Amino acid sequence: MLDKKIILAITGSIAAYKSAILARMLVKEGAEVQILMTPAATSFISPLTLSTLSKRPVFSSVSAEDAWNNHVEMGLWADAMIIAPATANTLAKLSAGICDNIVASVYLSARCPVFIAPAMDLDMWKHPATVANVEKLKSFGNHFLPVGYGQLASGLIGEGRMAEPEEIVASLYRHFQGAQDFSGKKVLITAGPTYEPLDPVRFIGNRSSGKMGIAIAEGFAERGASVKLVLGPSKLSAKHARIETTKVQTASEMHSAALKYFPGSDIAVLAAAVADYRPREVADQKIKKSEGQMTIELEKTPDIAAALGKIKQPGQFIVGFALETNNELDNARQKLERKNFDFIVLNSLRDTGAGFNFDTNKITILHKGNKRKDFELKTKAEVAQDILNEIAAFFK
Ligand code: C5P
């Protein structure tokens, strides 16, 4: 039950269609929803659809022909304001304090927490102007919902998709009901793939996107922890102010960073897909094509998880991952023991929708002593919450 008064502000992006679903979900959860639209948003979705779903009139200007829509009153009425989708234009206006439409005017008057779900094309999202606006808005205390990676309306593929309505609702729940149960805890997370160079041009890598590890980092930060994220080469990044990211390329670099942060950590979650082998020699120059076959000699990379498991002190907690394609449970159980994990999260590439690059995952958590918990297929943000809840149970 989310019995709160919520302003849902919609701006002019193609993702506005998702806001209709969001409005319906919020009403279903018991919220009173007041929808505001910028004039541009009304070209993307009809106010009639939204007023029907929200059961209230929708406002798209401060002064209508026969009335003045009191933005100050609305700003004080709300328990939370959600701006979804938030365009680059709106982010720029909000960060500069420009209020030439009802969304920006209510934003400036609002005393409640504000949740912003940006949506735009990948180049607009990466532009230094947008990056600076987001940073500024974060420094004002606004909550940002991470953008997703995938196909964009432009046809390009990258970061910039609006967070899914389910994730926005989950964030609100966490805000209003969610405990800051990891407050004061220091957490180390490894995520993403590693790239092991062969020469200045080529590398051996894997298909990990880093999505699961980043979702876990965001989950911890939202629940109060300070997070050190050691991230291999991923297109994605973590946005929360309590996450400090160290970017690495190779297993060896990830190993050094993890060893540096682990002694000061209460919890380590090792979600990275670390290469097990690397080329024994790295050529200074690009390796030239020659007749016949070529053999690359590989040597083992450091096992980061095993190294941390060895130096683990009482009170420290390590969660490992196992991505398997066959004989899943046995393999995961062996890793749990061998690497001295407190529990292990198993996902199988045999489950549809689970694993690399998907937005969803299906996991099994294996504890010591054969205790096992199976979970449904869920979004990675929800899976992250399940993993965090499992860890929280140990710290209670
Ligand atoms: O042995 P395997 O690679 O399947 O083990 C998976 C677990 O060990 C994951 O938690 C992964 O992050 C971690 N790992 C590691 N360093 C390695 C290999 C795996 O930390 N070199």
Image (cartoon, rainbow, N blue to C red):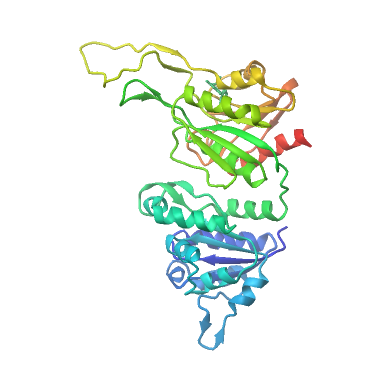
Residue drawn at x 65%, y 31% as measured from the top left:
265
Residue drawn at x 62%, y 31% as measured from the top left:
269
Q: Position of residue 90 (x, y in %)?
A: 46, 64
Which image quarter is the C terminus in? top right
Does 380 appear above or below 336?
A: below
Q: Nearer the viewer, residue 386 or 142?
A: 142
Q: Is residue 307 visible?
A: yes
Residue drawn at x 50%, y 24% as measured from the top left:
274
Count of labels shown? 0
Q: Position of residue 2 (x, y in %)?
A: 70, 59
**Image quarter for ligand 1:** top right
Q: Nearer the viewer, residue 356 or 88?
A: 88
Which image quarter is the N terminus in? bottom right
Task: Find residue 393 and report its image quarter.
Answer: top right
Task: Find residue 285 and report its image quarter.
Answer: top left
Does 122 appear above or below 202?
A: below
Q: Is residue 42 left or right of residue 2?
A: left
Residue drawn at x 70%, y 41% as measured from the top left:
184
Q: Is residue 333 visible?
A: no
Q: Is residue 248 left or right of residue 34?
A: left
Name the outermost residue toward the left. Answer: 291
